[in-house]
Amino acid sequence: MTTEQTPIHSGFGATTTAAEVLEGRDLSRLTALVTGGHSGLGLETTRALAGAGAHVIVAARNVEMARAKVGGMVHVVVEQLDLADLASVRDFAERILAIGRHIDILIGSAGIMACPETRVGPDWEAQFATNHLGHHALVNLLWPVLRGGARVVAVSSAGHHASGMRWDDVQCTQGYDKWLAYGQSKTANALFAVHLDRLGRHAGVRAFSLHPGKIFTPLQRHLAQDEMVAAGWLDDDGNPVDPTFKTPQQGAATQVWAATSMQLEGLGGVYCEDCDIASLDASEPPSLVGVRLHAVDAAQAERLWALSAELTGIDAFTAR
């Protein structure tokens, strides 16, 4: 049964922190994999999960940097993964499968935003490739250690309001706009969760996507200061001035909630924000609050899955 895109009034909110979501929880029997788990929201997610006792695998492109960031955290290990490189994704998956340990939680927190036009792999647009295709390949390759009971959390964004899937030019070969490309990649994250939940629920795997909120993290590394000043995020001296921005600890809360909350038992395939299931947004222009229909549409989710399987050559569900 499809879960309705309707808030459940979780009791948490925009200012809730990841640690507060897990207060009193014992996750010592669980194994979590967090892509980008050494930086920004991923680091706060790793810290919260490990603090509750979970064994956490941090997947990072720069292993030395990641180990320096998570050093001292108990039950946290770092493995090399470059989501923009399918060979790296395959190598990573092989190492994880060889361990033979079931993964209870997989959080796709790694990503890039508004970067200059970049091509990776077989001429793929970098944001679509890194944010979506790499995670599609990863989850499918790790299916043997996910099935039987797991939650997969795709970190999307309110950026999905900027663009649905650009089906006539997914790889942005007819012109590149960094924000439209980012918006498409975040729509893809949400659609991925919709279809994975449909395919995986009978094997005990449920999937969610989410908007973490606006947070200052290394995700803004491709943005010039004057661009953030013009957006109203910073003042002319580079100081934060937008009161709607969250702390990293608050920003990590929704993905931790989606990955662990008992309130979501039996549910899946929905887009969340502020530690709750988000409402649909049909306003014009888009409000940037809630989820647009194009990001939770089952037909588009199925179409994206087929395209992703074709592009990567990886689909755990046709190989059965």
Image (cartoon, rainbow, N blue to C red):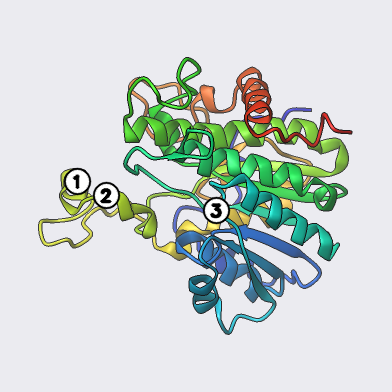
Q: Residues within 10 Å of mark 3 (few under 14, many from 20)?
A: many
Note whether residue 224 is visible.
yes
User: Mark 2 = which residue?
Assistant: 223
> Mark 3: which amino acid?
Ser
Q: Earlier in the sequence, mark 2 or mark 3?
A: 3
Residue 170 in picture, x, y percent from top left = 48, 24
Q: Residue furthest left?
A: 236
Marks 1 and 2 in Cβ contact (< 8 Å): yes
Q: Earlier in the sequence, mark 3 or mark 1?
A: 3
Residue 73 in picture, x, y percent from top left = 60, 80
Q: Quadrant of the C terminus?
A: top right
Q: Residues within 10 Å of mark 1 (few under 14, many from 20)?
A: few
Disc 3 to disc 1, C-alpha distance: 24 Å
User: Mark 3 = which residue?
Assistant: 109
Q: In what element is the residue under mark 3? A: loop
The answer to whether 251 is drawn above or below residue 265 in the figure is below
Q: Which label number is shown at residue 175?
A: none
Disc 1 to disc 2, C-alpha distance: 6 Å
Occupied quadrant, residue 35:
bottom right
Q: Is residue 196 left or right of residue 320?
A: left
Q: Quadrant of the N terminus?
A: top right
- Residue at 81% over, 57% down: 97
Residue 30 in picture, x, y percent from top left = 78, 65
Marks 2 and 3 in Cβ contact (< 8 Å): no
User: Mark 1 = which residue?
Assistant: 227
Residue 284 in picture, x, y percent from top left = 35, 20
The answer to whether 199 is drawn above or below residue 14 in the figure is above
Note whether residue 104 is visible.
no
> Mark 1: which amino acid?
Glu
Near-viewer residue (253 or 12) = 253
Disc 2 to disc 3, C-alpha distance: 19 Å
Q: In what element is the residue under mark 1? A: helix
